[in-house]
Image (cartoon, helix red, strand yellow):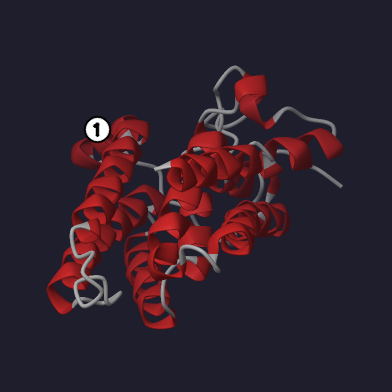
Amino acid sequence: MTERLICLAIGYVCGLFQTGYIVGKIKGIDIREYGSRNAGTTNILRTMGLKYAGIVLLGDAVKCGLAIFFATWLYKETHGEIMRLLFLYASAGVILGHNFPLYMGFKGGKGIAATAGFILFGLSPVMSAVGLVVFFSVFFTTHYVSLGSIVLYLSLVVCSFIFMKTDFYSWTQAGIGNLYWEYIIIIILLTVLMLIRHKDNIKRLIAGTERKTYLRSRPEIDVK
């Protein structure tokens, strides 16, 4: 259990690097005072434009990769059989740090860009491809980032059950098949957190008033 808590803590520290907030400050604004008042990639895209959104998305994804790197460095030799579970703990920590940064009054993003880091660095290449296809298929069809995020997380829940049924990580073969339930529970908890963070978006989706996002939309403020 100690290694799980350490990976969670490492992730939280990495998650405190608020790319959106930092990019905004570099350009002379507090992004939390504009648009949806969220420090995440989508608000950066709408407020500052595609270039800055790309920087924020990359930064928020890489910090998850960094947490996974540290987890690998610490535990690959001693806990090699459960590294995928530790990757999930590290990623969960990043999402918590991103969403609830201590030094920003616990007001951060919604964790989707950080989740992208988990998909890219914490899953197998095949499942990474599935996650990316799911999100972008929904986004480019509907132009709702929130809906893409919801469907993405639901697909992660489905995938986690598939992992268990197919012994994807060979945990059952190694006699530790019970870890699949731990993995599933964490994914479900992260999904619940995502739904809570997107509760207003969900209400607007149901009401048909959710704002669509287009990559080439004109930024709301002029930043050089």
Q: Is residue 201 found left or right of 122 in the rendered image?
A: left
Q: Vertical placement of 81 versus 59: above or below? A: below
- Identify residue type, mark 1: Lys
* Mark 1 lies on residue: 203
**Residue situated furthest bottom in the rendering:** 126
Q: Is residue 81 found left or right of 13 in the rendered image?
A: left
Quarter holding the N terminus? top left
Residue at image position (56%, 31%) is 108
- Image location of residue 168, percent across then percent down: 26, 77
Which image quadrant for residue 104?
A: top right
| Residue 75 makes an appearance in the image | yes
Which image quadrant for residue 61?
A: bottom right
Front one among 14 and 117: 14
Residue at image position (77%, 42%) is 23
Front one among 60 and 202: 60
Q: Secondary structure at mark 1?
A: helix
Q: Vertical placement of 30 versus 59: above or below? A: above
Which image quadrant for residue 83?
A: bottom left
